[in-house]
């Protein structure tokens, strides 16, 4: 329960910690919570330090539950491992490893100093920072492909502007608002002239809006054209601070990303309609692949299917 509470606390920092991950921590002594904290903003104290300060002297001999392995490096703040050792914590339970090659190894250092450590390796803890984990470990954005399809797998309905329902379309705008960048291919640009903005939802800032392909962009388009190899463009975007990329558009771009093994997650909105004709979800893929964490949920009259190509 204490790790679940730490996950809840971590979410309070969502939107304020970028480019850092969200992290939560709980200090428990003799079965009682004596301190809580979360990473509130980039450059501020990390969750462990906040929780330990809240616990004060009660941290001595206590158990610290934290959603991610405590860091060991000097960044804008000192290593959290130092604060844990100084506070006299007896046990540390971490929900996930820190994939940052510059900051990992905290659990080993704590164990070497006599602290009992436990790694839960919680999927929920890893999913909570899925974009950041990919960005810091692979130096590219976490790529989510979103698409709406008919029950017979078509991505368009003849005579209709939309495939999915209103609730699904609103969720897509929320996904855009939560992403660092949104992208389509040039085929979608020419066919639909999409704006790719997050509309009618709370958005702290608009995502960067991209078009992958040779171009040229139509006159007046506000999209950024990215014409290089996909892997090179993603590396460049990561270097510019883009941690999450929401990929929209048609089957050509979706197939290219999958064949290049650059797609991490699929979100497929299935509408209760038969398209009858038109392009399908994907083109011919070079290889088959099994997906992980397959889930289905209702969104209005549609069903949202989600799965991971690469689990975080």
Image (tube, rainbow, N blue to C red):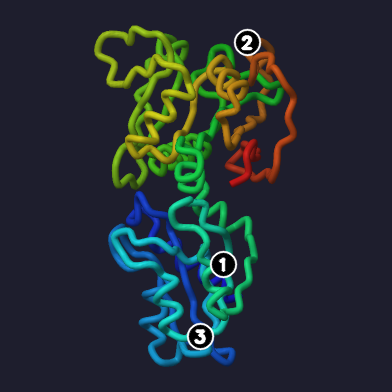
* Image quadrant assignment for residue 122: bottom right
**3D distance between C-alphas at marks 2 and 3:** 58 Å
Against 276, residue 305 (above or below) is below
**Image-quadrant location for residue 16:** bottom left
Q: CA distance from mark 1 to mark 3?
A: 25 Å
In the rendered image of this protein, does residue 124 appear above or below residue 227? below
Q: Is residue 55 above or below residue 184?
A: below
In the drawing, does residue 121 fall left or right of residue 40? right
Q: Would you say residue 7 is visible in this rendering?
A: no
Alpha carbons under labels 2 and 1: distance apart = 55 Å
**Residue under the image location 37 percent in, 24 percent down:** 210
User: Which label belongs to residue 278?
Assistant: 2
Residue 162: x %, y % from top left: 51, 23
The residue pinned by badge 3 equals: 33
Left or right position of 57 against 165: left
Instruction: Say the numbered circle drawn on residue 108.
Output: 1
Residue 186 is situated, as x and y percent measured from the top left of the image, at: 43, 12
């Amino acid at each position: 329960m204490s790790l679940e509470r730490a996950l809840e606390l971590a979410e309070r920092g969502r939107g304020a910690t970028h480019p850092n991950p969200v992290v939560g921590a709980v200090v428990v002594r003799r079965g009682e919570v004596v301190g809580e904290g979360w990473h509130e903003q980039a450059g501020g104290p990390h969750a462990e330090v906040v929780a330990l300060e809240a616990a004060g002297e009660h941290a001595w001999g206590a158990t610290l539950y934290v959603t991610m392995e405590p860091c060991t490096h000097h960044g804008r703040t000192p290593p959290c491992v130092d604060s844990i050792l100084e506070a006299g914590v007896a046990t540390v339970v971490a929900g996930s490893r820190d994939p940052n090659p510059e900051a990992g190894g905290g659990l080993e250092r704590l164990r070497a100093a006599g602290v009992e450590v436990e790694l839960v390796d919680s999927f929920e803890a890893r999913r909570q920072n899925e974009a950041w984990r990919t960005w810091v470990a692979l130096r590219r954005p976490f790529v989510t492909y979103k698409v709406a399809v008919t029950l017979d797998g078509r991505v368009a309905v003849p005579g209709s502007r939309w495939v999915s329902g209103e609730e699904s379309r609103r969720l897509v705008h929320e996904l855009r608002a939560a992403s660092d960048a949104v992208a389509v291919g040039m085929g979608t640009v020419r066919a639909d002239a999409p704006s790719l903005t997050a509309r009618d939802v709370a958005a702290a800032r608009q995502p960067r809006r991209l078009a992958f392909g040779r171009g040229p962009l139509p006159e007046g388009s506000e999209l950024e054209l990215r014409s290089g190899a996909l892997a090179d463009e993603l590396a460049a975007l990561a270097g510019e601070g883009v941690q999450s990329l929401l990929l929209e558009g048609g089957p050509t771009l979706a197939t290219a990303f999958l064949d290049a093994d650059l797609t991490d997650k699929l979100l497929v909105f299935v509408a209760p309609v038969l398209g009858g004709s038109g392009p399908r979800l994907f083109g011919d893929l070079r290889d088959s692949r099994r997906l992980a964490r397959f889930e289905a949920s209702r969104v209005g009259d549609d069903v949202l299917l989600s799965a991971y190509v690469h689990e975080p």
